[in-house]
Image: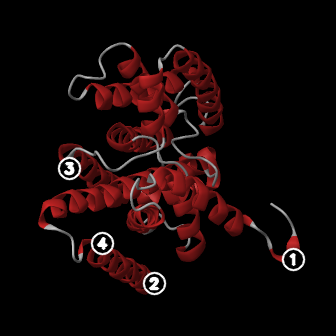
Amino acid sequence: MKRKFYFLLLTMAALIAWLLVATLKGTPPELFEFRLTRLTAAFFVGGALALAGSLTQSIFRNALATPDTLGVSGGAALGAVVAILYGAGHLEWSLPFGAFAGAMLTFLLVSVIGKFGKDGALELLLAGVIAGTSISGILLYLVSQANVEELAGFSWWMLGDLSCVDPDGVVAVAAVAFATLVVARIFANDLNAMVFGDEGAALLGVAVPRVRFWLLAASTLLVALSVSICGIIGFIGLVVPHIMRKISGSNMRYLPSLSFVCGGLFLMGCDRLGRWLEPVRQLPPGVLTSILGGVVFLAVLYRKGGRSI
């Protein structure tokens, strides 16, 4: 497994280096810093979303479970809409703070609704679905109250855009991502034991509520920071960990790191493709991640023999 792990890491590192050279080669000096920041943001945001997805899927033992399922992205969107609609959108850091606060408050709300740490993972997942549905309704109401200018700005943010990311925000995402990788490595054996279910893991000595809380909190923080600096970029946390699990297996000693690197590579590739398809307007990568992510996910889940999902 170690040989496969290092081989996959080296392969993805080579592809990332190729993307960097292909994108930055021949760049005018006045655009070099902008493009480098955008590429760095794409790598760390994509990696953070994939890392959060791999942890959430492992905790819930469900390939369809992501922080999005818990309503975190919806909560971030709600916080951003409130910041835009109620006059704070012009203030520095108001939009990122609104998105971050909305995501974290949603996580806390879901934890309370789901009787966090007492009744297991199913109740928490159901609470996330309920919260996400409620937030969608609130979002629709708030958007209906927006004027044309506010609606245009919010719609672009919802597409997932890397053109205006703040370097300080990228540093924050990178720092939390590396810290989460360390935490995931510490809890790797516990996560591997949780494949037997909450009761089975508890019999093996795993403090299931504690592990679930800290790893879900770290995943929520990653998603909240990512959404706060570039908007909602979907499907990465769902597709990338699933693909890496198919390729490398489910050992949580390796899966979080592989998902992180592959997620960064995937978003960098989508950003590059979007600028190639729309060189003037630069198609937001969030649009492509949704389209390509859905296609790839269907392809991965398609079973042999022509059977449907």
Instruction: From the image, tell me which residue sits under label 4.
Output: 23
Question: Quick check: marks 2 and 4 in contact, CB under 8 Å?
Answer: no
Instruction: From the image, tell me which residue sits under label 3.
Output: 171
> 133 above or below 163?
above
Question: Quick check: marks 2 and 1 in contact, CB under 8 Å?
Answer: no
Q: Quadrant of residue 101?
A: top left
Residue 4 is tagged as 2
Q: Callout 3, which amino acid?
A: Val
Mark 1 and mark 3: span between their CA atoms? Answer: 47 Å
Q: How far across and how far down the image is residue 229, in percent?
A: 32, 41
Which-is-in-front pick, marks 3 and 4? 4
Marked residue nearer the N-terminal end (2 or 4):
2
- Left/right of residue 230 with respect to residue 110 in the rendered view: left
Residue 305 is tagged as 1
> 170 above or below 13?
above
Which-is-in-front pick, marks 3 and 2? 3
Question: Quick check: marks 3 and 2 in contact, CB under 8 Å?
Answer: no
Name the residue at the left extreme.
Answer: 29
The reply to whether residue 107 is in sight is yes
- What residue sits 60% from the left and 45% below the top? 198
Which-is-in-front pick, marks 2 and 1? 1
Marked residue nearer the N-terminal end (2 or 1):
2
Mark 2 and mark 4: span between their CA atoms? Answer: 29 Å
Name the residue at the front extreme.
Answer: 280
Q: Residues within 10 Å of mark 3 (few under 14, many from 20)?
A: some
The reply to whether residue 256 is in sight is no
